[in-house]
Each structure stands twice: as structure tokens, then as C-alpha cells.
Image (tube, rainbow, N blue to C red):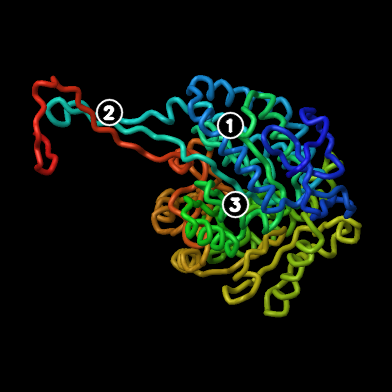
Amino acid sequence: MTQVVEPDIQRTSAPSETVPHWIGGRRVAGTSGRQGPVYNPATGELARHVDFASIDEVNEAVAAAKAAFPGWRATSLSKRTDIMFRIRNLVDAHRKDIAGFLTAEHGKVPSDALGEVARGIENLEFATGIPNLLKGGFSEQVSTGIDVYQIRQPLGVAAGITPFNFPAMVPMWMFANAIACGNTFILKPSEKDPSASIFIAELLREAGVPDGVFNVIQGDKVAVDRILEHPDIAAVSFVGSTPIARYIYETGTRHGKRVQALGGAKNHMVVLPDADIDMAADAAVSAAYGSSGERCMAISVVLAVGGVADPLVDAITSRLPKINVGPGTDEHAQMGPLVTREHRDKVASYLDRGRDQGASVIVDGREHDSYRSAGFFLGPSLIDRVTPDMDSYCNEIFGPVLEVVRVQTYDEAVRLVNDNQYGNGTAIFTRDGGAARQYQFDVNVGMVGINVPIPVPVAYYSFGGWKSSLFGDLHMYGPEGIQFYTRAKVVTARWPDPGTSQVDLGFPRTR
């Protein structure tokens, strides 16, 4: 059994020395004897440790969630809505505290961290409409004296496995709809930046979420595998890389679970010859280097069509020295470090591989002053004349490296986008409405931006890609999120006069 940390109901905005679990409504210290390091990416220093759960500790969290489910499911929609409003208001009131965790452990600059929290709050706001979202359908008199109606009911215990790049927003994508629909929830956050998960758990308890409805299990593959195999977990949501997403989907479904697993991305931005060059350059820089490129909706490839390539590359290049790279403690910083030194070095290696394979490295982020600091920094990098057979194009780099592929025609650009294994997001920049409409029709990608570089849907639409960017049938959050966390039940009802009852062995049909 795990041990409760005392005091167990205190909420603090200061990260603890060791990040614990949250089980049954309280902080719980791990007993597995295994921990992981949590770094401050801006300084390179070890900031704290995080407990790694054992199989028994995962089982304990599942047992708490399972025990809480009957009561939470029976809680009225009005009461659940009231709690969701309180969650929303508490998260809003403490958005700076949550952003502080993101800066300390992920390295996000304040504007990026606050933006992440704001997008998470949008999902909490969507979930406050749960009475309307769970309305079923009713058909009167489908046959003489018979009515049919459909209701949606929760699944039971749901789990979310979330990535390092959005340690606050992505959990809110998942748990907001899950608990609003009447499920209980287990969050397995990234071990790289886990503190925000415990702070959010404390806010949920303060909002009135009953003990056991929301739990947090810290850990690594041991915890993930037990979540995927546990017979009392009905559904699993995941966001991460494609190989892991495939593993999550195949393992979870093999154990009878409903799974949605969002994988990687290689998002292309098509720039047509008629596009406004300055507007396209601003968009490309914003979408490629925001959050240090560590987001699945980052633009990593610009497809420059025809003669637009040279002026566009010049415009992008001229903007890069103006980006203020620095720690989140610098209020003027626009781009922070990467999450770990190992990840930074892997991203930087694509610059050498690109050069070796014939591309032109226009800007090398390793020449930026920040790269020589103790933190995990890499300056904005730009590679031109990339071809589809190069390693940098074939792989998801997930860092501040923007590639330019030169193509001659619109058709060539569309073919490259559609031939790519990923189908997460894409954008087109043009002044031609007909071309833009044709692009949204032609392209095999789940999310499309027209003169919008990062087409992340608002909370009342759903998020997700196609092809190897999504495993499962339903996208994340929004209306499809409600579908994912519920199942439909159809009721056929008749209230006849008992005197009219008779035996009828024929197949039921309308009369």
C-alpha cells in the first residue's frame, strides 16, 4: 500500500521536492522505490524527482476510481455542471500558478505557458454544457403505442496518458469531458514535467470533485502497461509519437478497451505564388518556433510553390535574429529551451544530416548564444532545398527547425502532403479563394488552415488527424470527445392496456 503524504489537502503553487501520486482525493507518496529526474530546462539543473508507480499503485488508483464511479454516475447533471463551472473558475483564477509549473519544468516562456492554460480552459468551458451535450433523441409512435429513445451513458473508469509538451492543456482535453459525462478518471502525465498534474488535482478537489473521481499516477512504461491491461479500465486516451500511439492502440484494444491515440505529425504549409510574402513569413516563423517547435501542430515544412521560394526564404531568414530566445524568467523571451538535453541534441543532429544529404542550412541554431548556456537551448534553425528523401523530411523533428521544400506546381505540393505518412495538420497561404477551397477538398489531412498556420480547432469542434496521426475512430475533445466517453443505449417502450397483451412469435415489426 502507498503512504499518504501529510498534510494531504494543502494546495500549493510551489513544486514539491518529490512529485507524488494523487489517489482517492489526496497526495500519496510512491513506495516502488523507483523515481525519475525532473529538470529545469532553462538552467539544466535537476529540480526534483517524481515517483514512479508500481503495478500495485496503479491497481490502487483504479480501485479508487472504480469505487467512486457508481456515486459519480448517479450524481445529477445539474450537480456535475455546477462542479464543472467551479473547476473552470478555479483554473482560471490560478492560470498564472499553472503556467509557472509549465515554465519551471517544460521551459515554456510566460506567453506560451499562459496560452496553453487558456486553450485548456476552453475545454473546461465546453464541458460545462454537458446537460445539452448529453441530450438524447426521442421518436414518438414508431409503431402503434411504441416510443423509441436513445440515451448516452458513461463507460466507467477512463484513463489519459499525456505528453510532455502540453502538461496542462492535454489533460484538460481529456478529463473535462470524461468526468462531465459521469466517468471517473486516471491521469498518467509525462514524467518530464509532472507537477502541474498534482496542482490541478488539488483544484479539482477544491471545486467539489468527490474523492476517487480524479486520480493521478506518475510513472513510466510500467504504469502505462498496467493501465492498458487493467480489466477495470474501459477507455484510454493518448497523445504522443506515432510508434507509441500504435502500441497504445494495439495493446489497449487487445485488452478490450476503447482507445483513441493521437500520434505524430509533419505539418506542411503550402505557399502559393500569389500569397502575401510578409504575412506568410510571419506565419511560418510563428508556427515553426513557438513553444520551441515542441508541438504536434507546429509547421515544420514550408512548400514554396514556383517563384515564391527565394523571397520567402529571405523574409523568414530576416526574422530569425529578432526572436528573443531565453528562459521563462525573462519577460521578454519569445522562445525557451527544449525539454531535455537529449531531445535538444537529437533535434540538432538533423542539421548535420540535412547538410550531409545536400540541403542548405541557412540558419544553424547551434550558433545562437543560448546554445552555449547550461540550459537545453537551440536557436531557431532553417534548412532550405530539402527533398522528400532526406532524413530531416522523413522524420518528425519536434524542435525549432523549419524546412523549405521547393516545388513547381500546386499539384506537386498536394501530392507531397498526401504522400506523407502523417495527416495531422496543414495550411495554405494564398489570396485565391478558389485555390484555397480546392486545397481543403484535395488534401488528406484532418485539420486544415486557410491563411491560418496552426489550425487547432476551438473546443466545440474536435481535434485529430488522419493516417498515422490517429489510431482509433474518434478525435479528441469536442463533440467526438463526448461520444468517446459515453456509449449509446436505445430504449423501446410501450405502456399498453394489459388487456391487449398477447403472444406473438413473429419478428418485431412496425404496425
Question: What's the residue type where badge 2 is placed?
Answer: Phe
* SS at circle 2: strand
In this orientation, which residue lies closer to the viewer: 447 or 104? Answer: 104
Q: Are marks 3 and 2 in contact (CB under 8 Å)?
A: no
Identified at 9% across, 21% down, the residue is 499
* SS at circle 1: helix
Instruction: Give x and y (percent) for residue 420.
Output: 51, 67
Q: Are marks 3 and 1 in contact (CB under 8 Å)?
A: no
| Quarter of the rendering containing residue 13 | top right
Identified at 61% across, 60% down, the residue is 241
For label 1, the residue is 124
Q: What separation in Å lies between label 3 and label 2 (alpha carbons)?
A: 37 Å
- The disc at residue 138 is 2
Identified at 52% across, 31% down, the residue is 180
For label 3, the residue is 227
* SS at circle 3: helix
- The disc at residue 313 is none
Q: Dot 2: few (<14), some (14–19), or many (≥20) neighbours within 10 Å?
A: some
Instruction: Give x and y (percent) for residue 105.
Output: 80, 47
Identified at 36% across, 32% down, the residue is 151
Of callouts 2 and 1, which one flags the residue occurring earlier in the amino acid sequence? 1
The answer to whether residue 281 shows anywhere in this view is no
Q: Quadrant of the C terminus?
A: top left
* Residue 266, above or below 162: below
